[in-house]
Amino acid sequence: MNKKYWAILAALLIIVTSFAACTKKYDEDRIITDRESNTHILATDENGQTMQDEDGNIMEIITDNKGKEVTDEDGKIVSQPVTYPDLLEVDGYAETKWLKVKVERGWEQSGKLNIQLKHTKTDSFLNFGVVEGEKQDDIIAQLNKMFDTFKKVDEYEKVDTTTEKVKIGGIEMTKIRTVLTISEDAVVEGENPTQVICYYIHEKDGNTYRFEYSTTPTNEKNVNFEEIISTVEYK
């Protein structure tokens, strides 16, 4: 994918802090370390799912200075809310405060700051983002403005954009698909001169979800991006 495009795209993404995993006596997936190097043990429910409070914060198990779980008068382990890290990888899922996606065979989670799945055979990418408190129409307008800007860049010989309504997983979304043809003198050696960028935009509970894939026309026919999008689990 063209470097200048990625620079513009990166500006649209929410820059957040990632959390690295560490190990203790719990499963590695249940332990995270924040930017101040404080360790948090994720509390899980009876189904093994990470617990969240009504505000979307994750629940962590409270331990004493010896690392032992603190219990209440009934002997139950005490937990408390902590700000949800922007990305967790637990039990084969990549998840955020708002959604979770199973990392299927043939895909790998490659994002450090957000859910970004990479299709290992084609090097195609599928990103899952959410913009809090923004309206769908505003996000669509921003994307259209971005693609209009591309049309004025000499690097792109041709920019074709189409917009349509689609339904995926029972949810109506606006699909914005753009085919970028890079000028011959701007093509990097080994790079496909034609790239496809496709966004799926929809609103839910006051936030706007923005799913996006980037690939080539040939790979687009061989990778079922919408099938992966249809498996998204909202929280």
Image: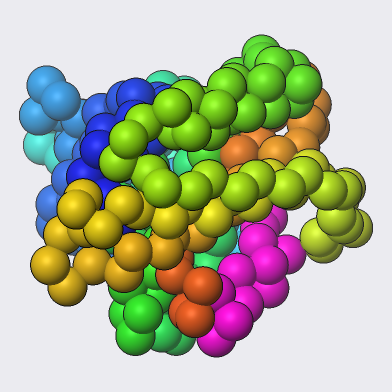
Q: Is residue 149 above or below residue 147?
A: above
For the N terminus, the quadrant is bottom left
Does the magenta segment cover residue 225?
yes
- Where residue 208 sits in the image (x, y, percent)? 68, 28
Q: Nearer the viewer, residue 201 or 104?
A: 201
For the C terminus, the quadrant is top right
Residue sitting at x 41%, y 84%: 106
Relative to residue 27, is residue 12 drawn left or right?
right
- Where residue 79 sits in the image (x, y, percent)? 45, 32
Q: Is residue 15 above or below residue 119?
A: above
Residue 186 appears in view: yes
- Where residue 113 sits in the image (x, y, percent)? 30, 39
Q: Nearer the viewer, residue 92 or 227?
A: 227
- Where residue 31 sits in the image (x, y, percent)? 26, 49
Residue 51 appears in view: no
Residue sitting at x 54%, y 55%: 179
The boundaries of the magenta stretch are 220-235
Residue sitting at x 21%, y 45%: 3
